[in-house]
Image (cartoon, helix red, strand yellow):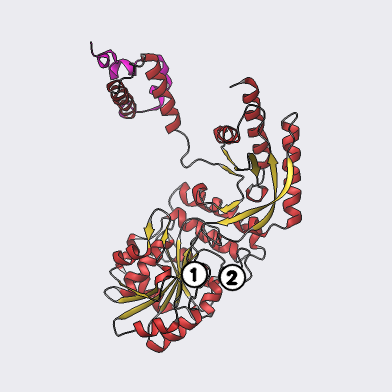
Amino acid sequence: MDPRRQLPSVDRLLAHPALAEAAAAWSRRALVGVLRDALDAARAAIGRGAAAPAEDELAAACAARLASLARPRPRRVVNATGVVIHTNLGRAPLGARARAWIELAAAGYSNLEYEVAKGERGHRADHVDELLGLLFPGFAAHVVNNNAAALLLALSALAKDRDVLISRGELIEIGGSFRIPEIMECSGAQLREVGTTNRTHLADFERALSGDTGLILRVWPSNYRIVGFTRQVPVAELAALGKGAGVPVLADQGCGRLFRDSPGPASEQSVEELLEDGADLVCFSGDKMLGGPQAGVLVGRRELVRRCAKHPLARALRPGKLTLAALAATALGAMAKDPAAELPALRMLSLTEAELRAAAEELAAALRAAVPGCAPEVVAGVSRVGGGAAPEEDLPTTLVRLDPPAGLSDDALLARLRAHEPPVVARVEEGRVLFDPRTLLPGERAIVAEAVAVAVAGAVRGA
């Protein structure tokens, strides 16, 4: 007899006691979908030679999947890695004002596109464009849903069917196999490479300029670097060339520093400096650069920003109300007397050596109190900005280093920490687990200590 015939029917599984609680909370449609998935997977496994699972086993697996589906998505995790703008962990944590404004915007209806005083339709961009413009007096700003979208919009609005000059060494690929030439192709602009991979001179741009040139593009290299015998044309020189030829210069900065005095990698030119050097437009990430939600910001000459904002593609790339609420609150925080007190990512980058040392000592003490016999070490180490910024630049920090308990490997300890609720994400170096207090939010030292205690207790029990 074909063992697949031994599998229970969907109706039989629906009546199983293990799914009684789920049946009270989930629609029949959802339950049936999960049960069918489980039965299809069981049939496929049997076809590969596996034994037919018992009915109780199938029901328990379906109940577990339903419970997993009901967890918040994305889930909160504790970032103990020391990478401040951690792309895999949601990049920048939002400040208290941003979280509160998101809740207000989500709680009911809002004036997203409504002028309350006039009683007529308004524009969603007004909630953030004015605030962002105040960060850079004399310039205008416009927001879309991420920095790649900002670049795509600028290319589409300003250089469709025209040449865009770019150094060959800046034709980079960013996360998710997203390549600058492909973005340019989607915009309808014509890619015109100048210079060589490692060296590009102003004369290369001068020779390439023609009546067909619509834009000069300077691309921030993210976590890609060419070292040694290199040459890159400064933005100030490109801006002078573009001004003489009537061709705008767009700097895709991605991330780094907002202002010259902002904390962060000194090797990255700030948005403020790029505009001062004559860039007509700068685009950057709202999360990587501002420490807010994922967004793309275009800032620069008013007439160019206006052309981008009025382009049909701008509507397709516009952010929703929750992003706008968080970004408005973040922009306001960036203008505060003490921005680091408002924006968690900025605070993390601003921590002093003494503050990091004190935080590490407190974490080590919490570990010793939570785990009998635990012997954490407080040692010097490095953090990273993350988000692709300054990949070769270290941020000095103080780490807490922990040897895994006997019988537990470093990878096994990391896995147990990730299994905690909320998961704790740390890193390993030379077989030891490292916790960096730089990226721990208030109250998270206790969570780390609890997660380690649970992991070690499980190892002792052999769980």
Q: Position of residue 186 (x, y in %)?
A: 29, 64
Q: Position of residue 317 (x, y in %)?
A: 36, 60
Q: Position of residue 39 (x, y in %)?
A: 30, 23
* SS category of the residue bearing label 1: helix
Image quarter of the C terminus: top right
Q: Position of residue 170 (x, y in %)?
A: 43, 68
Q: CA distance from mark 2 to mark 1?
A: 18 Å
Q: Amino acid at mark 2?
A: Phe
Of the two numbered discs 2 and 1 on the same chain, state the one appearing first in sequence: 1
Q: Is residue 173 visible?
A: yes
Q: Amino acid at mark 1?
A: Glu
Mark sitting on residue 100: none
Q: Residue at x 62, y 24 (%)?
A: 458
| Location of residue 77 (image quadrant) | top right
Q: Residue at x 41, y 63 (%)?
A: 172
Question: Disc 2 marks which residue?
Answer: 259
* SS category of the residue bearing label 2: loop
| Location of residue 42 (image quadrant) | top left
Q: Residue at x 29, y 76 (%)?
A: 162
Q: Which residues are magenta?
A: 1-29
